Image (tube, helix red, strand yellow):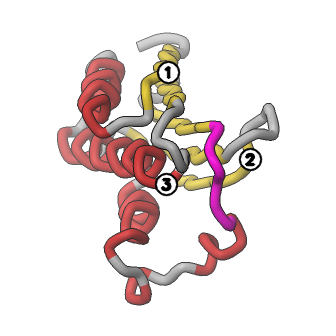
Amino acid sequence: MTGETSVTLVLPAQPEYLLVARLALTGVARLAESDEEALADLRLAVTEAAANVCRHAYADGAGDVTITLVLSADDRLEVVVEDDGIGFDREGVAEWQPDELGEDGMGLAIIRAVAADVDIGPRASGSGPRLRFSRSLRS
């Protein structure tokens, strides 16, 4: 592949739309020479990230999740998941240890285990959180 490919999805933050995020990620990854293990890990990570938005971002359950997939020329896939929800304590998240987490805290631990360059911060707009991670699609 030459150049960069970028796809942005804006989906309702509801569990029934998680499959759309997984399918979009798979479609973008198939543009590159992707290793099946790396692809499976990224599908898991995007599912966990979007599921966290569904569970935690909006008190009334009404809101969107924005997922941006960027495939670079060197077959690295970057995933950015953003929402306008209530966010979370970014300082506390940095200190979480996998052996201390309950079921609710496993999503970020899984993402950190399967992806590289995990970054949590505010959206560029200042409203809501942004989770960014990437991984090479090659083994």
Q: Which residue is farthest bottom?
A: 100
Residue beneath disc 2: 122
The answer to whether the residue labelled 2 contacts the one labelled 3, judged by CB atoms less than 8 Å apart, is no
Tell me the residue at 49%/29% (across/down): 67
Picture quadrant of residue 89: bottom right
Residue beneath disc 3: 56
Image spot of residue 82 (x, y percent): 59, 37
Magenta stretch bounds: 84-89
First of labels 3, 1 by sequence position: 1
For this view, does 12 lie left or right of residue 37?
right
Q: Which mark is residue 57?
A: none
Tell me the residue at 29%/41% (across/down): 43
The answer to whether residue 88 is magenta is: yes
Within 10 Å of disc 1 (Cα), the crowding (few <14, some 14-19, many 20+) is some
Q: What kind of secondary structure does the magenta stretch mostly adopt?
A: loop
Q: Nearer the viewer, residue 128 or 27?
A: 128
First of labels 2, 3 by sequence position: 3
Give the secondary structure at mark 3. helix
Tell me the residue at 54%/15% (across/down): 4
Q: Nearer the viewer, mark 2 or mark 3?
A: 3
Give the secondary structure at mark 2. strand
Point out the image quarter for the N terminus.
top left
Tell me the residue at 68%/65% (across/down): 90
**Vertical relation: 126 (above or below) 91:** above
Query: Which amino acid does the dot numbered 3 rest on?
Result: His
Q: Which mark is residue 10?
A: 1
Query: Can the viewer see residue 86 in this picture?
Result: yes
Q: Nearer the viewer, residue 87 or 137?
A: 87
